[in-house]
Image (spheres, rainbow, N blue to C red):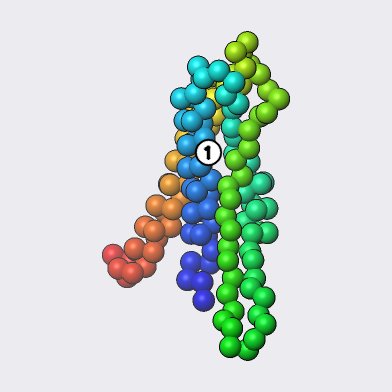
Amino acid sequence: MNLFGGTISSLENGLNYASLKNKTIAQNIANVDTPNYKAKDVSFEKMLSEARNSTINANKTDIRHYDFTIKQSTPGVFSYENYQYRSNGNGVDMDAQQASLAENTIYYNALIDRISGKLNTLNTVIKGGR
């Protein structure tokens, strides 16, 4: 039985994506002066497809063997390999990274507000409307 109808877990997945994207942007900004550094980004579509296709089932050869499933989670981080923004081979565009950071911060804060609203609603229900 799923108590929250999947909403909380969907919001949690969104927060995981936003957090990973924020770490990737921070890494790009930290390496803005590193020669031959290639900028990285996070693809939500890649994360979603990898989450769907990342289960490994055990091959049971005897009835005494246990059934188990292993979930492999590799985030959808990729590099812009052929992109060169500066003459030293660095592929980080500082203006684009700062804009992406601002956009991701707004997305993250919206998810936090939505989770807070959900939890406040549950709190009201638990307290009986008081």
Which sits in the foreground, 52 or 91?
Answer: 91
Please name the residue that numbered disc 1 is placed on.
21
Q: Amino acid at mark 1?
A: Lys
Which sits in the foreground, 2 or 129?
Answer: 2
Q: Is residue 20 visible?
A: yes
How many marks the image carries: the answer is 1
Instruction: Tell me if residue 100 comes above or below residue 84 in the rendering.
Output: below
| Coordinates of residue 6 in the picture (x, y in percent) | 54, 64
| Coordinates of residue 99 in the picture (x, y in percent) | 54, 25
* Point 62% across, 17% down: residue: 89
Which sits in the foreground, 46 or 99?
Answer: 46
The residue tagged with tag 1: helix, strand or loop?
Answer: helix
* Point 37% across, 57% down: residue: 120
Q: Is residue 106 visible?
A: no
* Point 51% across, 42% down: residue: 20
Instruction: Tell me if residue 89 comes above or below residue 79 in the rendering.
Output: above
| Coordinates of residue 31 in the picture (x, y in percent) | 49, 23
Residue that extends furthest to the top in the rendered view of this protein: 87
Q: Locate the C terminus and report the quarter of the image it occupies.
A: bottom left
* Point 64% across, 71% down: residue: 57
Residue that extends furthest to the bottom in the rendered view of this protein: 63
Residue that extends furthest to the right in the rendered view of this protein: 82
User: Mark 1: few, some, or many residues within 10 Å (few <14, many ≥20)?
Assistant: many
| Coordinates of residue 65 in the picture (x, y in percent) | 59, 83
